[in-house]
Amino acid sequence: MTAAARWRELLRSGRRPDVRVRLLGSFTMDAVLPHLGTALADLGVVAEITAGPFNQIVQECVDPRSETAALEPDVLVVWPRLEEFWGEGGLDEVASAATMAAGRLCARLVLVLPATPVDRPLGAGDASNPTGVAASAASARERVRAAVCDAPGAVLCDAEETVRAVGEQSAYDHRLGVLFGIPYTELFLAAMGQSLGRSVALALRPARKVVVVDADNTLWGGAVGEIGADGVDLGPGPGEAYLAFQDHLLGLRANGVLLALCSKNLEEDVWAAFSRREMRLRRDHLSAWRVGWRAKHEAITEIAAELGVGVDAVVFVDDSPAELAEATAALPGLATVAMPADPVWWRAAVDTAALDRLPPTADDMARPERLRQDRDRDQLRQTVAPEIYLKDLEIWVEARDPEPADHRRLAQLVLKTNQLNLNGDRLSGQRLAELCASPDHAVRLVTVGDRFGDYGQVGAYVLELGDRTTARLGLFLLSCRALGRGVERAMVADAFAVADRHGIGTILATVEERQRNEPARRFFTSLGCRVGVESTVDAVDAPSYVSVRESGVGRG
């Protein structure tokens, strides 16, 4: 079935869309729509997608009365071609307009890095020309990359990679380009639909935090329980593929992903294999493990609980189709990767949306250390009475005005926080940056720590100062790792202190009912609020066992 036919079926299904997506491009974007729509559906995203007018990117982005503005999209996909924006500053103008439009519309931005044009007057000599087509295109692309990567929450999708994957001769249809303004083949558009779908999903969803790997025929060749640690294949030859896969896992770990092991084996056999000199992945690289004979879905559930994440934050890698099927049947939110029977093809297996992620923040990189700290906290909890545990933690809270360097983390908090989240609003990074600079708003970023270490930047709120008589909480969220420690009360106390500095004594909030924000509803109900109704928030003090550190004055 063609993408167009599948897309028509999806439209007729009557399913309520999760998101509104707007496509803007310098060619006829209607050709992209069914490929993107079906790709998103395969990723579990039901989208309402519309295409903007032909080659009107900048006009649609800058005009507040444009059709794009009226649609209020959740995601803005912008695809300029260098052929239409060749010349000094052309592509830069597109990137600037798209970034500003996404901020104004509170939309996630997915911008396509355009491929290098195929028309090169010098032919083979273009590679030797520092001002030639390839060099000029590379310079323009890198300027756009630098500009868009500075916009929190924005995602780039590289068309050059897709051209390379399908081949230049298979990517372009110059006849269609002349006749209908569609310069690409169906093969290329299908591949770009997949790439754009993954980019849109990456913009909308938090990345998965944990990769759980099997051992036999996944980290090494053969079954260690049958052939022994010295017998498993780690190269030279086919076994080298397992070592390359281990290097890939270590690359994920270097970018903030937690690694865990789940193996049906005897522990002594597994650790004997890990002690092999050839192994790149070491035992101390693992944040958790379960080695034994229980069902793997049970082991994965335990690993997720130990690491403080939901199963929907886990990717499970195994070579056994039966084990993967058993785990996904028991754990519907789990993502899986099938290690191929021939390990040399592992790269194709891990090229999946489940492992897509944006560059890590400092908070991501601190995750392994926080895990160690959490284990120390658990030991304390087991040795003292519950009523003195929080006091013995020596919790401290610091709320301050965000700096520009904090905007990416702020956007990440908005995207990832579900449980203690006032209203579930997914403000774009650009919109958050605008609020940080607004004299009519006070934005506060909250850092928490205790005697065992720093939790990181785990909370934020936005206080709308309005007419300077009443303030409103437009955003209030706290990461689940800081829940139940009195931090949320300290944040409310800080909000009242900020409001007081502006001569405001009343704060209002509207607590929305969302699928996973029951902790937020319970907390704000305890402060006198009613769900779904704008209510006055009761003033509170920070708990006595929480030390509040002064930092910043709550600019507004």
Image (cartoon, rainbow, N blue to C red):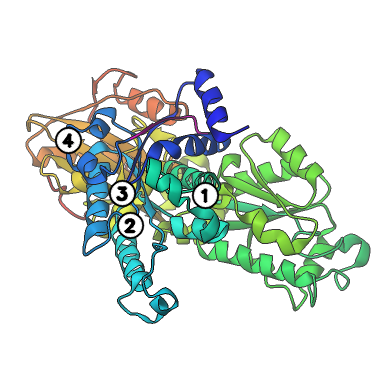
Sequence-first tag of 4 and 3: 4
| Residue wearing tag 1 | 188
Q: Position of residue 526 (x, y in %)?
A: 34, 25
Whether residues under marks 3 and 2 lie with C-beta atoms below 8 angstroms apart, the answer is: no
Front-lying residue, 87 or 460: 87
Work out which residue is located at the far right of the displayed protein and give it. 226
Whether residues under marks 4 and 1 lie with C-beta atoms below 8 angstroms apart, the answer is: no
In this picture, which residue range is highlighted in magenta?
44-51
| Residue wearing tag 4 | 64
Sequence-first tag of 1 and 2: 2
Magenta highlight on residue 128: no
Quarter of the rendering containing residue 216: bottom right
Residue type, label 1: Phe
Residue type, label 3: Val
Front-lying residue, 366 or 220: 220
How crowded is the residue under tag 4: few (<14 C-alpha within 10 Å), some, or many (20+)?
Answer: some
Asked whether, in this view, residue 527 is left or right of residue 169, the answer is left
Of labels 3 and 1, the one closer to you: 1
Q: Residue at x 37, y 29 (%)?
A: 523
Sequence-first tag of 3 and 2: 2
As drawn, the label of residue 446 is 3
Q: Position of residue 197 (x, y in %)?
A: 49, 43
SS for callout 4: loop
- Quadrant placement of the N terminus: top right
As drawn, the label of residue 217 is none
Of labels 3 and 2, the one closer to you: 2
17 over 435 or under it: above or below: above
Work out which residue is located at the far bottom of the displayed protein and give it. 128
In the rendered image, is residue 549 in sight? Answer: no
